[in-house]
Image (cartoon, grey):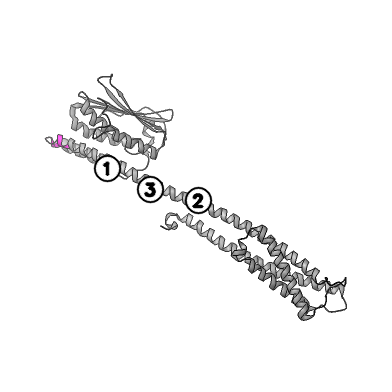
Amino acid sequence: MPLSALMNPDQLGATAADGGLRRRSGWRREQIIWVFQVVFWLAVGATLCGFSVALRPDEPPPWGAIGLRVVTGFTVTSLIDMLFRLPALRGLPRAQRWPLLVIVAILGMAMTLATAMLLLREGPMIQPTGTALAPFAPRLVATLMWCAIYLGIDLLDDIHKSEMQFFEAAAAAAAAENRAIQAESLARQHELRQLQEQMNPHFLFNALNAVAASKNDPAAVEQVTQDLSEYLRFALREASTLEPLSRELHALEKYLAVQQKRFGDNLDCRMSADRAAHHVLVPPMLIQPLLENALHYGAQTSRMPLKVNVRASVKDDWLEVVVANSGRWVPPETTRSPGTGIRSLRRRLELLVDTSATVEPHFEPDIDGGWVRIVVRMAATLKRSPPVEQTIPPT
């Protein structure tokens, strides 16, 4: 899969900009070198002309000799630049590349001087000392000046390339991190869908049992069907990642109305929640799987009527939800273990809230024939305040 398929438009724009900067960087270096070459050798020509006029004011400047020196100097140094832009030489360490460039430049200058003197039988244009080294000295000075400026440009170019490599490495690391985050997000979405799908079939099975239990009472069947449809509208909708607990509390009233038809007088269920708890943002279906376990396993292990209590409250910026039922704790080894719902809820809290969220079961065998309590604690993120006690009437 190409990298562009995993990157958002902003990242693609940044990558394109980086590529344009790299191309522009190479183009600018070449332009700087060419401007430097033209300006430097024109300055050398102007300097030679000035010296010639100053030393021999009665004679016209030797335009031919000056032009030849400027052209040959420009040509040789251009060839040296092309040579040292080859990958084999460009890849050398700076401690090797720079001395080699100076040596090549001096040798090139010496060869052009020797060739010019041989072919043109050139006499010394500026020879105040009358020595044979007079033609060599100004060329050596010009060559060393050219090398110093050229190496300065080369150093700036190396620094710029180092900065570009740093930014490219940072961009590559950011792109890799973005791909990892996207992969993790997709994995979490897939896992959450699987966890959500584990809950719906259980409820539908129990709801159909409730409808079947009311088959001899058409009005009861109609009411159960209406309550069931309203709860399914909540359970099967496209839920947000986090939503106010009040949405589920309202839907659980319909859920318990269905279950009340199923159990009749054998169910005594109470729900209470303070107002602050209503506004805490929680994962969808936080209470329903625990309440379903309480009804399913409580009906198997409790004396009738089955008692179920649901309480939600906010204390010290923590939401605490307690789902308790009369009966005994069913070990996780059974075929349809209550541990499945607890494990799924614990995993969803870890993915959507924080690892500090807990889901803890407690069995109290000595209280009123035995009670099982599941306590959920998580940091309370309020959609809006104020904490005034509100009690939901029992169904």
For disc 2, the neighbor class at 10 Å (few under 14, some 14 to 19, many from 20) is: few
Farthest bottom residue in view: 120
* Residue 265 sits above or below residue 155 on the image: above
- Secondary structure at numbered mark 1: helix
Give me the residue at 28% from left, 21% from top.
Answer: 365
Q: In what quadrant of the picture does the N terminus appear?
A: bottom left
Question: 134 or 262, which is in the foreground?
Answer: 134
Horizontally, is 282 left or right of 135 in the view?
A: left
| Residue 117 visible in image | yes
Q: Give the amino acid at mark 3.
A: Leu
Check residue 62 in the rendering and tell me which mark sits there, or answer none: none
Image location of residue 37, percent across then percent down? 69, 69
Mark in front: 2 vs 3? 2
Image location of residue 159, percent across then percent down? 63, 56
| Residue 244 visible in image | no
Image location of residue 4, percent across then percent down? 44, 57
- Tell me where the magenta segment starts and ends, as one range: 211-218
Q: Which residue is mark 2?
A: 173
* Residue 124 sits above or below residue 203 on the image: below
Residue 213 forms part of the magenta stretch? yes
Q: Which residue is mark 1?
A: 233
Q: Give the amino acid at mark 1.
A: Arg
Q: Give the amino acid at mark 2.
A: Ala
Query: Are the residues flagged by discs 3 and 1 in contact, CB closer than 8 Å?
Result: no
- Secondary structure at numbered mark 2: helix
